[in-house]
Amino acid sequence: MKLRDTLKINEKGRLEIGGVDCTELAAQYGTPLYVMDEAYIRSVCRGYTELLSRKYPNSKVAYASKAFSTLAIYNIVRSEGLGADVVSGCELFTAIRGGMPASDIYFHGNNKSAEELAFAVRENVHAIVIDSLYEIELLNEIAGRQGKKQGVLVRVNPGIDAHTHRFIQTTRPDSKFGFSISDGTAANVIKTIVSKKNLEFTGIHCHIGSQIFELKPFELAVEKMTDFIAALSHNNIKVPELNLGGGYGVTYTSEDKPLAPFEYVDAIVNKLNECIASKNIAAPKLVLEPGRSIVGEAGITLYTVGAIKEIEGIRKYVAVDGGMFENPRVSLYQSKYDAVFANRALDKPCETVTVAGKCCESGDVLIENIELPAAKSGDILAVFTTGAYHYSMASNYNRNPVPPVVLVCNGESDYIVKPQSYEDIVSRDSVPSRLGECK
Ligand SMILES: Cc1ncc(COP(=O)(O)O)c(C=O)c1O
């Protein structure tokens, strides 16, 4: 694993994050534990904002909060000058509670409910990203009822193959997201929106996929989106905002070779400036929605090793106290991870093992075939790059509590999500009286 500034091995040979010893974090807070590194999050945010303020000031970075949505993260990214993209009523609720001004919020989703739309309009979100014909009528009516003209973007499908895992690639022709540009649907949808009394067309959006390492797909997206802006302007439709989504890759294992986060933005801006000039279009406000690249590498998950099972000549399982309830990405996307024993991070790997979770599913494996030092029960396993789409995707499967989240910075650590107790989980259950008393 490539270690970096605030992620290092200390003089005791133990892994340290944000100036805090991970073995001590495990002892203090218990495991499994999500740990988020505040300094890293801030440094990525600054990388984006500094570059954009120099090269394309009419811009906004809207943190894609589906990656990790809690009160504290909205507080951090807002203080770095970012807005937020939300995809549900409760993400919107959390963003606003976390201090994110509604005027910096973009609301996405291919099937937002009437209640969610009414909530967003009431809160005066900057833009709702239209992603279905059904939503146009519904939103127009809701905004009218509230006496408002709601700003909307239109999610379009520029039809780019970003060569990523098929489940997280969203712009194939066969996608539930976006209106196709090539078959004319997107232009027709925009014309319909422009004719609606209570909607204000403010721009177009696309998101070409996630965990993308190459610059080319992003440059291609800029090319196609600016072609579309030029075509719309020939029909006298102005496009004040161009939102290009997120998708910049991060390092999960040494096989991943992403560029630095700001390098993707640099390439996008260079291409956009070139296209604005060559196509003679009005420069739109540029909006970018990185999620994974802001929080992914900021996070690690700490586990305690429990059972160890060796099947002679076949495999050695090292079981930890987490699993698919706190990291469903392996079962969903066959995601790969790197890990070390945090309590002895300098020990040399000497065996290939499979890290298994504790859920009642044979497929509940966290890392298949990783080289580790000989595992002992009680070791603290640190899995890297778990800041994005882990806590936010966690569940109570097998009634396992969702682990707490601790934020570390300059040697300090604090809960940003408190532990869930058995009592918390059961508290929402209800037994109809006709079933009789529970014990
Ligand atoms: C509309 C939209 N914007 C932004 C993102 C963030 O992508 P990433 O976390 O890969 O940067 C996503 C991810 O699915 C998305 O659907």
Image (cartoon, helix red, strand yellow):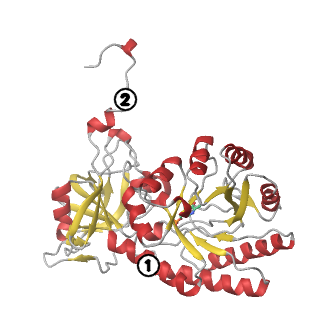
Q: What secondary structure is marked by label 1?
A: helix
- Residue most toward the right? 235
Displayed quadrant of residue 299:
bottom left
Say which of 230 and 118 sits in front: 118
The C terminus is located in which quarter? top left
Residue at point 34%, 78% (across, down): 2
Please tell me in which quarter of the rendered image ligand 1 is found.
bottom right
Left or right of residue 14, residue 370 in this image: right
Q: In this image, 151 relative to 309: left or right? A: right
Q: Provide the residue designation for mark 1.
A: 46
Report the residue marked by disc 2: 429
Name the residue located 57 percent from the left edge and 86 percent from the top edge.
55
Q: Residue drawn at (65%, 57%), measured in percent from left and top?
A: 129
Residue 390 figure quarter: bottom left
| Disc 2 packing (10 Å; few <14; some 14–19; many ≥20) | few
The reply to whether discs 2 and 1 touch (Cβ–Cβ < 8 Å) is no
Horizontal and vertical percent position of residue 6: 28, 77
Crowding around mark 1 (Cα neighbors within 10 Å: few <14, some 14 to 19, many 20+) is some
Q: Which secondary structure lies at badge 2?
A: loop
Q: Position of residue 317 (x, y in %)?
A: 28, 55
Confirm whether residue 271 shows in the render: yes
